[in-house]
Amino acid sequence: MLCKLLHTIGSYLILMRQTFTRPQRGSVFWRQYVHEFYQLGYNSLFIVILMSFFIGALLCVQIKINIWSPWMPRFTIGYAMREVILLEFASSIICIILAGKVGSNIASEIGTMRVTQQIDALDVMGVNSANHIMLPKILAMTSAIPLLVTFSIASGFIGAYVTCWFGGFLSLSDLTYGLQHSFESWHLWSGYIKSLVFAFIIASVSCYFGYTVRGGSIEVGKAGTNSVVVSSVLILFTDLLLTNLLMA
Amino acid sequence: MITITDIHKNFEHQEILHGISATFDAGKTNLVIGRSGSGKTVLLRCIVGLLTPERGEVLFDGRDIHHLTKRETTFLRQEIGMLFQGAALFDSMDVLHNVLFPLEMFSSKTYQEQLQRARFCLDRVGLSDAESKMPSELSGGMQKRVAIARAIALEPRYLFCDEPNSGLDPISSRIIDRLISDITHEYSITTIVNTHDMGSVRGIGEQILFIHEGRAEWTGTSHNINQASNPHLREFLKHA
Ligand SMILES: Nc1ncnc2c1ncn2[C@@H]1O[C@H](COP(=O)(O)OP(=O)(O)OP(=O)(O)O)[C@@H](O)[C@H]1O
Ligand SMILES: [Mg+2]
């Protein structure tokens, strides 16, 4: 068990060393990068906005119904909501959702390339297949994530405004006051820093699982599932570490 | 010319190749035949360097593919074209870009010249009107032909084909065989073809290596294969 774990970590590190080398052809790399940015980043935008909108709205409603009491100032609803969104939701939870969407997609795409011998074809040509396939994905994912987080925060807040407006349980000026109350910009930045690490985990872990598929379609399916499970757990684990580091 | 000496390959303590030695000449179609599971694919993968043999050496005109520097390996690989058992086209690209890919990665030509070369290769395999199709829209035989076009795009000196006509009808098989044989002679390429199709053996077998359970048991040509005395080969021919 421990042996297997060490073996996995070792081969992951070796694969990463192969991946992070200079691309053999810059023009091909950039084309792939733009393509992946579109695939992994832009195509995730809708789900991120949708989920964040509802979570923003739900947070407001839940805080109002279950936590808020008459002796609390009204703006606490906005304040608590902001902190939840900035500290955990827009970075960690969004990344866990993306681990499901993007991670399984990457793992099964690369796994299929492996079992249909496309990766062998690249290797025989003399292309560094790890670098050619994985580097654009990893870089695209890590560079798209700050944008996704920004959209997530914004649409979470919009969700809050919309519920307050329609629900009528909190005036918009109270909400605005709460959202601005004792704002610490470091909380925002730490969210961005965490999300960068998480994006790297999602992309590299699912690339690893896809790249090391042996066998056929069943293994490709397993690789998809494994990559989601492992990257979600790793995200939560590093979240714990990073939160202690960044917030201490 | 490719020379292999005493190739041994194990998988999990089970020896699959038991010391195979052979010479494959340039400008000839060299066939490797044998029953399913005899180790043809494993041998080919050892030769092109996708697998590392436990023992033995593979020389590409004197260069040992398993003991080159990284730069030399990349350089040698550009002289290798390979046709996989399942064609292995890149399914995210259309036919033209599949053929263009090796050129974009390695050629120093301008884009226009690369395009010209890719179209020439597609024309050579008779598929110039399919260039904007995706691989999934092609039949198995057409995919194999595109794969041949991709394999010859960089004007290779060595061409490897793993069962080029498995899963194809006899007529398409002969078309692929002819194509491989013509290209081999035209550019004086060292070609190695894995097959268990007797049609290919009779049609293009200029030099034949028969392997049985990981051992090279017979070498010869399509003319003297019927006079072979090896019992395993006779058995193989009887059922073909
Ligand atoms: N990656 C692997 N791991 C373990 N055993 C393997 C592996 N690849 C091949 N083998 C074994 O090696 C033997 C030879 O397989 P190989 O694929 O070379 O046969 P083949 O001659 O190409 O057959 P076919 O004509 O069906 O393609 C088989 O018994 C197979 O089980
Ligand atoms: Mg085979």
Image (cartoon, coloured by chain):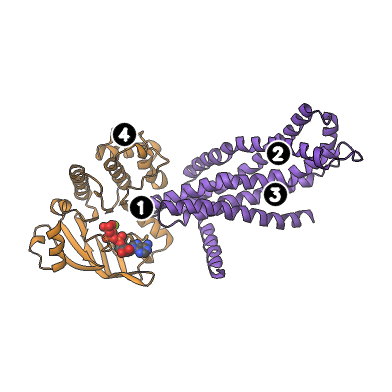
Chain colours: A purple, B orange
Q: Are marks 1 and 2 in contact (CB under 8 Å)?
A: no
The verdict on a common chain for dots 4 and 1 is: yes
Q: CA distance from mark 2 to mark 4?
A: 49 Å
Is A88 left or right of B116, judged from the image as shown? right
Across and down, in percent, residue B174 comes to 18, 45
Across and down, in percent, residue A208 comes to 52, 55
Residue assigned mark 4: B130
Mark 1 belongs to which amino acid?
A: Gln
Q: CA distance from mark 3 to mark 2?
A: 22 Å
Dot in front, 3 or 2? 2
* Secondary element at image label 4: helix
Q: CA distance from mark 1 to mark 2?
A: 53 Å
Tell me: residue B127, above or below residue B40: above
The verdict on a common chain for dots 3 and 4 is: no
Residue assigned mark 2: A55
* Secondary element at image label 2: helix
| Camera sees residue B51 | no
Mark 3 belongs to which amino acid?
A: Ile
Q: Disc 4 is attached to a residue of which chain?
A: B
Q: Disc 3 is attached to a residue of which chain?
A: A
Mark 4 belongs to which amino acid?
A: Ala
Quarter occupied by the C terminus of chain A: bottom right
| Camera sees residue B164 | yes
Residue assigned mark 1: B78
* Secondary element at image label 1: loop
Q: CA distance from mark 1 to mark 3?
A: 42 Å
Across and down, in percent, residue A95 comes to 64, 46
Q: Are marks 1 and 3 in contact (CB under 8 Å)?
A: no
Q: Nearer the viewer, residue A236 or B131?
A: A236
